[in-house]
Image (tube, coloured by chain):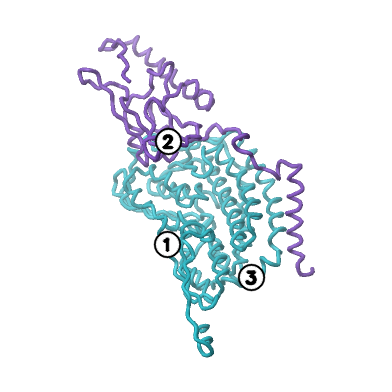
Amino acid sequence: MFFGFGVLKGMTVTFKNFVLSYFSKERLTTVQYPEERLPEKERFRNFPFLIYDNKPEDLRCVSCDICAKECPPKCITIVRDSDEAGKPLKRPKVFDIDFSICMNCGICEEVCPFDAIFMDHEFELAEYGRFEDLNYHKDDLLKSNEYFAKIRPHDAAEVDARLAEKAKKEAAAKTVAPPAVPPQPPQPQQN
Amino acid sequence: MDYALKNSETLETQTLEVNLGPQHPSTHGVFQMNVILEGETIVRLKPVMGYLHRNHEKLAENMSYLGSMPFTDRLDYICSMTNNFAYATAVEKMANMEVPERAQYIRIIMAELTRLVNHTLLIGFLLNDLGAFFTPVLYAFREREKILDLFEAVAGSRMMCNYFRFGGLKVDVTGDFIPHVRQIINNYPKFLDEFEELLSENEILMARCQNVGIISKDLAINAGLSGPMLRATGVPYDVRKIDHYSIYDRFKFRVPIGEKGDVYDRYYIRILEMRESIKILDQAIKEIPEGEFISKTGAVAAKTPRNFKLPKGDAYSRIEAPKGELGFYLVSDGTTKPYRYHVRAPSFINLTVLEDMCLGYKVADAIINLGSIDIVLGEVDR
């Protein structure tokens, strides 16, 4: 072949791509982001959120501190709540996640024994401040179980089934042997 | 140096020192080349590394074994799946863990898909270095995106996958995984044909790449090169064939080798390797069995990483990552944290021959020599 044939052959490829980009979605793959969006993948993970069951007071988190210990970059801070007598309660007083440190690995949701923390799909979180604005507190992190079922239907169904079975077992255990300590009245919610 | 002498007889000349990088798009990240020039010819080249040092190895000594897994994603951030793979095999070797059949197959599929991603992207960026601005690299990005979509659907993240666990995988693949991989297997050869039509016989590319940056066999072996860099010099050395780690002995594939060891060989060997990867994918996807995706002990270790201990001792485990031999060396003192954790990073060791490749060539050749080594600074500096 004559010199320059390889270049010309390459040019036909670019020309073919150029022309076909008007007709074929395969060739023109650009998505005009803010106006157009790709469908979200269910397993997509970004930052963690805390889950509550019916109302925001019913946090699933019992402040066991496992996620904070397992978190590789140590972005979770938990302080356990206590009543007036100083007795520790099974709920967090402070639950902070610093999103400027979090690296979206998803280990917190894997190790949580109470299915209380899950990875969110929310990714448009730009802020002006560098430090405090991205340090999300407990109230910012709370999201309902319905929201979880909306963004991750398969995982939510699995978790709900697991929790229902656990509740059934606990109820069965209670009917067999009544607990030594009488059930406590609901605590007044702080913050 | 003979260039300097030749010129000094006629006219007094001086060498010129040029810093290429660290803020330079052709250095693929924050890498500095300290080049001494005689006219336009390179007489000395000093690579300066460490701008992206993030303490990876020391960090790993202060956290649980699983805690380092998401950090391995960030070594070579283009092929996080193979980094996970290498680390998981190292821990499994120490803990004597079994990996279920299905997990093995999914691991192989993910590793070969990663090889496709890496080689496609490398060729795109190599052409960028040659001055073919962004047409080839955007074609490469277009195809890579299809594989990254698959990674996102399965592992949850496009690049920082964090998908492997000791003794298996984080989670089973989704229902549409196999059709999606089939689609990639069917479409990728067409794309490679098109890519080759665009590039392989291009006279400009041949003139720039052939007989440039030649590495001899001896130098390649003595410098400890691995991966496509070594095979391009004509040494048939592939850890997949030699160690038969995981279940690579079940697949039929060939190891392409080059002749001269120039930039063109290193370019072409990657095209051939991608074709072989597609063969492996094709076989793996046909044979993939049903079953568990993680062993029982592995599931416990993934759920409670803080209690996961390795027996006293050490282990070195290596795999054929897209860039070369990626190895993890672990020393355990019996606690939940590694006593020593070392990464044998292929792009770091392949980078050591850069000066030998560049001496006597022009500055523009140094750029494509660097591009053909296939470095990712996340892995070089760690």
Residue closest to the far left? A85
Judge whether A126 appears above or below B120 on screen.
above
On the image, the x and y values in percent for residue B374 come to 53, 59
For mark 3, what is the residue? B210
Q: How crowded is mark 3: few (under 14 residues within 10 Å), some or many (20 or more)?
A: some
For mark 2, what is the residue? B299
In space, the residues marked 3 and 2 are separated at their CA atoms by: 51 Å
Relative depth, front residue between B281 and B45: B45
Relative depth, front residue between A127 and A33: A127
Please state which amino acid type lies under the numbered disc 1.
Met
Q: Residue B8 vs residue B203: left or right?
A: left
Q: In which quarter of the image is the C terminus of chain B?
A: bottom left
Please state which amino acid type lies under the numbered disc 3.
Gln
What chain does mark 1 sit on?
B
In space, the residues marked 1 and 2 are separated at their CA atoms by: 39 Å
Does residue B254 appear anywhere in the picture? no
On the image, the x and y values in percent for residue B300 come to 39, 35
Asked if the residues shown at circle 3 and circle 1 are in contact, with their CB atoms under 8 angstroms apart, the answer is no
Please state which amino acid type lies under the numbered disc 2.
Ala
In space, the residues marked 3 and 1 are separated at their CA atoms by: 28 Å
Which one of the lettered chains is coloured cyan?
A: B
- Considering the numbered disc 2 on the image, is that residue within a helix, a strand or a loop? helix
Relative depth, front residue between B170 and A130: A130
For mark 1, what is the residue? B49
Q: Earlier in the sequence, mark 3 or mark 2?
A: 3
Q: Earlier in the sequence, mark 1 or mark 2?
A: 1
